[in-house]
Amino acid sequence: MNTVMHTGARGFEEWNHHLSSSCGTFHAEPPLEQGSVTFAGSILPSTSANALCAGARIVSNCHHVHRQQSDIRRDDRDFYYLVMQMKGSGVMCQDNGQTVLNPNDLVLLDVNKPCDFYFTGLSDQLSLTIPRHHIESRFRHRQILLNHRIAAGSRLGALTGMLAQQLFDVGEAEACESEAMLDALLALMRPSVSENPRLNGAYQQQTQAFMLKKAKACIEAQLINSALSPSMVADRVGTSVRNLHRLFANCGTTIGRYILERRLEQCAEDLKRHGAYEKVSSVAYNWGFNDVSHFSRSFKARFGVSPRAFRLQKPA
């Protein structure tokens, strides 16, 4: 891409300003390392004067980008977003739903509704703003499905992605050419985002399994952090606290119980490994417990003996 890469704290401010001027007001959270902004990103807006839909190529390593109800009132823009994940992966959230996008997947979002984007590492997205009346006139008498993945692996998805990129790169095409391309794009999108197909149970299960795996990985990485909480995990994973509780409930447990169980198991491993060479309180603090009495009670309830008695047991 022939554009300027912004870096650092100042670069992040410039990037965020360009994002809002190109796509509407958004708020982004830059990556931090030891309190310093480690941002890298770029914005390449569409420059065609004849294109019916504007757009931008958005690259960044931001973890979370979101649009709130107050931003919608401020912008008053009457569009839909067609978002295509070019590189990296992300989780899109809108209308109480979430969709995982992998490279070349697309999704339709409503500019007049709050939305959240969650990313891991560097992400590259193409975002087209399509006038509302174009979509609603062509999808008349059909329910528009927001935040519904148009899979790159499908024939329609592959063609939709190719045409979306062509519309962004249309250059100085005649107005009639741009309109014909937009009509073709909407015709390709229509089966995927304007009717109410039966829920794809296999894809839903895949998405839920992906989110649960990410949640458990986050918990493992943060077990020693005494401030670990459901809201922290939900933010890192890119879902709501409510959905996070639902993910663990489907496994017959709660996120609080899961965190406690994993900490107790790690403490038990350390007590076996170090035996009498490390204090029980040190083991507890090392794995995120703030209250030794609470730790001892929980440990005994889990393993049937106190931590002190457990570490004196001989290996079976």
Image (cartoon, rainbow, N blue to C red):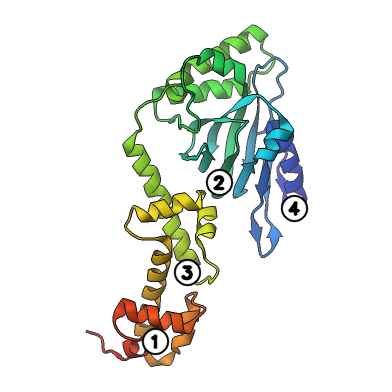
Tag on residue 118?
Answer: 2
- Across and down, in percent, residue 90 comes to 52, 43
- Across and down, in percent, residue 164 comes to 55, 23
Which numbered mark, 1 or 2, is in the foreground of this view?
Answer: 2
Q: Amino acid at mark 4?
A: Ala
Q: Secondary structure at mark 2?
A: strand
Kindly indicate the quadrant of the structure image that contains residue 196. Answer: top left
Tag on residue 274?
Answer: 1
Q: Earlier in the sequence, mark 4 or mark 1?
A: 4
Q: Residues within 10 Å of mark 3 (few under 14, many from 20)?
A: some
Residue 207, relative to residue 185: is it above or below? Answer: below
Of the 4 image quadrants, the one containing the C terminus is bottom left
User: To which residue does mark 4 refer?
Assistant: 9
Kindly indicate the quadrant of the structure image that contains residue 313. Answer: bottom left
Residue 170 as seen in the image, left or right of residue 238: right
Q: Are marks 1 and 3 in contact (CB under 8 Å)?
A: no
